[in-house]
Image: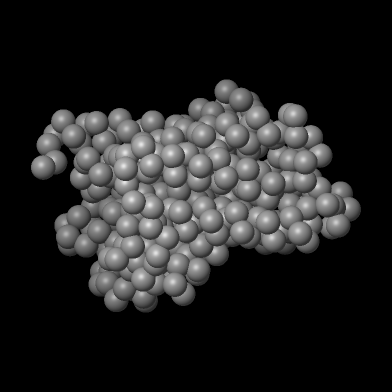
Amino acid sequence: MITPQNNSKGILFILIGMALFSMQDALIKFIYEDSALYELYFGRTFVALILLIGYLKLSKQKINLTTHYPFLTILRVICFFFGFSFFYISLTYMSLAMANALFFSSPFFVSILATIVLKEKVGIRRWAAIFIGFIGVYIVLNPDFNNFDYMKLAPVACALCYAISMTITKITSHKDNVYTQMIHLYFGALLISILFFLFTGKGQLGSFGNPTFQFIFREWFTNPSFAWPFIVAMGCIGAFAFYFVFNAYSIASPSVVSIYEYSLIIWSILTGFILFNNIPTTRTFVGVSIIISAGIYIYFREKVKDQMIVTDTPNR
């Protein structure tokens, strides 16, 4: 039974989880010049997988790798992996606040995909909220169409890939439990990272002058004594963040706690200011406010319709 006390505890857990995710993002931004993208991805995923398996063993839960949806599982793994590749890449040239604000366009994509894939009914009010939300994205991006930097769209690409992944999760969760799906994500990330190591891990394509492309194609293990303590910390922080988030959803009402995921933007603003002296512009604040308002409106419309398309699965 869900009680007000459980909801309060769930809100606290979701706030802690989002704070931890902002710390993980800050670590990526801090060390990207001393590690390769997929070295980082491999390390943090390996640590998180070990911690997850340890937790399942200690809690005496069965580790089940079988999926009832093999094709959808592979597609979900690929979308999730490359989605957050886009997000990590964006942190090399974008503030934490801007990257996370653009990432929160994902509920708009989820609503659109829900009409196409899940055949959910989305009314004119939610379509209007989606349109207004994308206006917020436009304001944050502040595009100059004469000389637009398409790299700024990386967090939006992450949001789209994430939305596809979560739409698939909506289908696969009928038969595959959450831990099985997480293990699939981790194993898939490790496998794809190893493939990147075979083709780029020895610096075969590492001749770029651009810092972002250096991050993607840099030789692995060039500065392990500095980078890997942060990578291990990143894996631990990410694992604990997921622990708090999933516990929040398990003990409290998803329709209550999910709205507090927007606190990630607030945490990102604070973290960016404290660690990197990044102060969002007025334009960014306006765009962020519109994105959050549109997302909250979609949440309330879903609750009224008893149709939790966007907010019944945790972000990240």
The quarter of the rendered structure image containing the N terminus is top left
Q: Which residue is rendered at x = 55% and y = 59% of the image?
A: 188
Locate residue 26, reporting x and y percent. 59, 34
**Foreground pick, 281 / 299:** 299
Residue 208 in the image: above or below residue 33: below
Within the image, what quadrant is residue 276 found in? top right
The answer to whether any part of residue 279 appears in the image is: no
Residue at the extreme top of the image, as rendered: 274
Q: How is the image coloured?
A: one colour
Within the image, what quadrant is residue 266 found in? top left
Residue 201 in the image: above or below residue 238: below
Residue at the extreme right of the image, as rendered: 207
**Foreground pick, 69 / 122:** 69
Report whether 80 appears left or right of 30.
left
Locate residue 190, reporting x and y percent. 60, 54
Q: Which residue is rendered at x = 27% and y = 72% of the image?
A: 120
Q: Which residue is rendered at x = 43% and y = 53% of the image?
A: 182
Locate residue 280, reporting x and y percent. 56, 35
The answer to whether any part of residue 201 appears in the image is: yes
Number of numbered callouts drawn: 0
Q: Which residue is rendered at x = 34% and y = 51% of the image?
A: 62
Report whether 3 appears left or right of 213.
left
Within the image, what quadrant is residue 117 found in? bottom left
